[in-house]
Amino acid sequence: MKVVAVLLAAGSGKRFGEKKQFVKLKGEPLFQYSLNTVNKIDIITDIALVLPEEDIERVKVFSFKNVIKVAGGKERQDSVYNALKQIEGADIVVIHDTARPFATERMFIEGVENVKKGWDGSITAIKARDTVKVVEKGVVKGTLDRESLYIVQTPQVFVYEKLLSAHQKARRENIYGTDDSFLMERAGYRITVNRGSVLNFKITTKEDIFLANCIVRKNF
Ligand SMILES: Nc1ccn([C@@H]2O[C@H](COP(=O)(O)OP(=O)(O)OP(=O)(O)O)[C@@H](O)[C@H]2O)c(=O)n1
Ligand SMILES: C[C@](O)(CO)[C@H](O)COP(=O)(O)O
């Protein structure tokens, strides 16, 4: 069975202020953390690393597994689609933001196992722990029922052919979402969740890289 990891590192880092995927965390570029984790997972056979087109040639990648480099697109969703087109023949695809350097092997493996059991997809998530309110123009409009609220992360694992068709449908309809599960949900597929962690946060702003540095240096 061909299980391919699509590692996304083609963002422009608008909220961070620079391309965060190349920022060094304890001597290694951020994107390399996800490669290191995926390299330890036997069930993942191949890797597609998605990079900004202008960086593809110069970026050095360390991996024991076969890695193809793919040029990213304008939006995250375009980057995923570019990778899907390059990995024809995959059975299962694992989509992961390299901006989440602390995703664990377990998260990848549980996702793949759920899909092998028959789910169309499995997404890493944690239950909401804070109270979530709807606020419009500074006015609190309501409080959501926390019991059914989950904070969603990556890795997200899908049946390859189904994710490809969900992406094609979204492109035909000019729909963009912030994750791949959204496209699968609107195409009617059944998605489950696997256990995430608060430590699997996304490096979005400079505050996040400060936290990540504390974690890798263990000085908190
Ligand atoms: N066109 C894009 C946009 C995002 N990503 C990837 O998707 C993940 C999540 O995106 P985000 O945190 O939004 O990264 P950026 O797009 O770099 O950040 P910003 O939205 O602040 O510009 C990251 O691993 C990022 O590299 C990508 O591969 N291609
Ligand atoms: C896919 C994701 O990481 C799940 O939380 C998130 O939706 C990416 O969103 P962003 O807008 O690209 O930061």
Image (cartoon, rainbow, N blue to C red):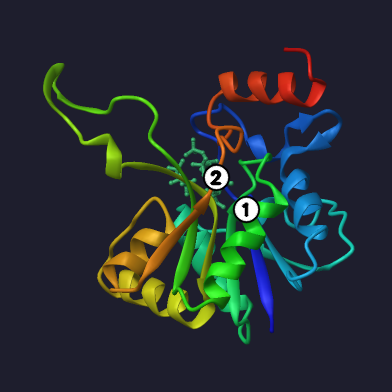
Instruction: Mark 2: give few (<14), some (14-19) or many (20+) Cα within 10 Å.
Output: many
Q: In the displayed image of the protein, which residue is found farthest to the top?
A: 220
In x, y percent, where is residue 162?
Answer: 44, 79
Q: In this view, does 37 lie to the left or right of 114?
A: right
In x, y percent, where is residue 197?
Answer: 57, 38
Let me know if residue 7 appears in the view: no
Q: What residue type is labelled 2?
A: Gly
In x, y percent, where is residue 158?
Answer: 51, 70
From what the image shows, is residue 136 above or below residue 28?
A: above
Tag 1's secondary structure?
helix
Which callout, 1 or 2, points at the residue further toward the start of the chain?
1
Towards the viewer: 169 or 130 = 130
Q: Is residue 42 left or right of residue 140?
A: right
* Mark 2 CB lies closer than 8 A to ligand 2: no
* Mark 1 CB lies closer than 8 A to ligand 2: no
The quadrant of the image that shows the N terminus is: bottom right
Which residue is drawn at the image coordinates 78% and 31% (left, top)? 24
Q: Which amino acid does label 1 sit on?
A: Met
From what the image shows, is residue 98 above or below residue 143?
A: below
Tag 2's secondary structure?
loop
Specify the label residue 174 is tagged with.
none
Specify the label residue 196 is tagged with.
2
The quadrant of the image that shows the C terminus is: top right
Specify the label residue 107 is tagged with.
1
Contact flag, marks 1 and 2 (Cβ < 8 Å):
yes
Q: Distance between the residues labelled 1 and 2?
A: 7 Å
Which residue is drawn at the image coordinates 37% and 74% (left, top)? 166
